[in-house]
Image: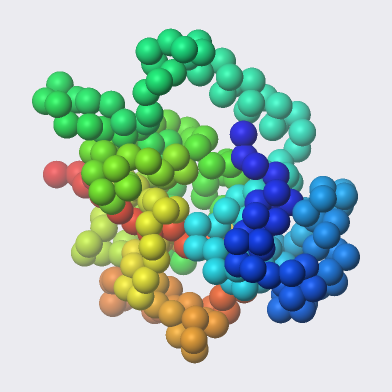
Amino acid sequence: MNPPLGDTLRELRRSRGLTLAGLAERVGVTPGYLSMIENRRVDNPPSMKVVVRLEAVLGVTDASLCRAAQWERTPGPIREELERSRRATMPPENSPESCQDRSMPTSGGEATVRVPLINKVAAGYPTGFTDLGYPARVGDDVVVVPGYTGLHGGNDPDAFAATVCGGSMLPDYREGDIVVFSPLADVTDGSDCFARLEPDHESTFKRVYFEDDQDRIRLQPLNKDYAPRTIDREQVAGLFRAVWRMSRL
């Protein structure tokens, strides 16, 4: 189960040494409103525009606030069903399986990681919210990948995979390739990223460059037949770095 948005926000704010008033001033909201969010006294989570501003001010790079807000927007019956499904697949407490992490050995002894495969990620311009709105750790299928340092030794519980469609990331990525993205991996200039965009919950796969002191982000295709796109940081709900690729022969 994802931690509540209010608890996550309070922990991040305190870890940065910020008061409610100080954070509110930098984000452009009132201290009282932030207090209500932290104490779970708002009926609905804040808008994604506010959440993105909070992440920018707090220096959040793993989209943890965005994920928490999206989870709280998920209708209650769906959340309950997901929790029931999760509990049904968990091994009994104290069983050998319950003591294992997501890494498991292959027949050759190499550790592997099971990663949820979401629907598709457009390698052209965004054409819709292609991960079907799933919260973290949920997908249509599962892919098994090597448990190596790109996934922090297999300890990134929110890593996910997506199937590339379109040709804007040629020649490095072809349609049908499966790419694994790690929210724990640092995003720097030139990183290949799954980008979630506002306001229409679009998603795309591009090489990312930061401009104007990181106030704007350039989404750069690798295929010269496609033009780059530069957008305000506030329009980016999340950037998740590619760490592994499975290609067709």
The correct choice, above or below, for 170 with respect to 149 in the image is below
In this rendering, does residue 61 appear at all?
Answer: yes
Left or right of residue 129: residue 192: left
Identify the coloring.
Answer: rainbow
Specify the quadrant of the image occupied by residue 74. top right
Residue at the spot x=56%, y=15% of the render? 88
**Residue 199 position in % (x across, y down):** 66, 65
**Residue 94 position in % (x across, y down):** 46, 12
**Which residue lies most toward the left here?**
108
Left or right of residue 45: residue 181: left
For the C terminus, the quadrant is top left
For the N terminus, the quadrant is top right
Q: Nearer the viewer, residue 174 or 52?
A: 52
Left or right of residue 54: residue 137: left
Residue at the spot x=26%, y=48% of the render? 149
Residue at the spot x=50%, y=37% of the render? 137
In this rendering, does residue 203 appear at all?
Answer: no
Residue at the spot x=74%, y=69% of the render? 19
The correct choice, above or below, for 85 with respect to 23 in the image is above
**Residue 8 position in % (x across, y down):** 65, 51
Counting labels gives 0
**Residue 41 position in % (x across, y down):** 87, 50
Q: Nearer the viewer, residue 56 or 225?
A: 56
Left or right of residue 139: residue 55: right
Specify the quadrant of the image occupied by residue 102. top left
**Which residue lies most toward the bottom here?**
212
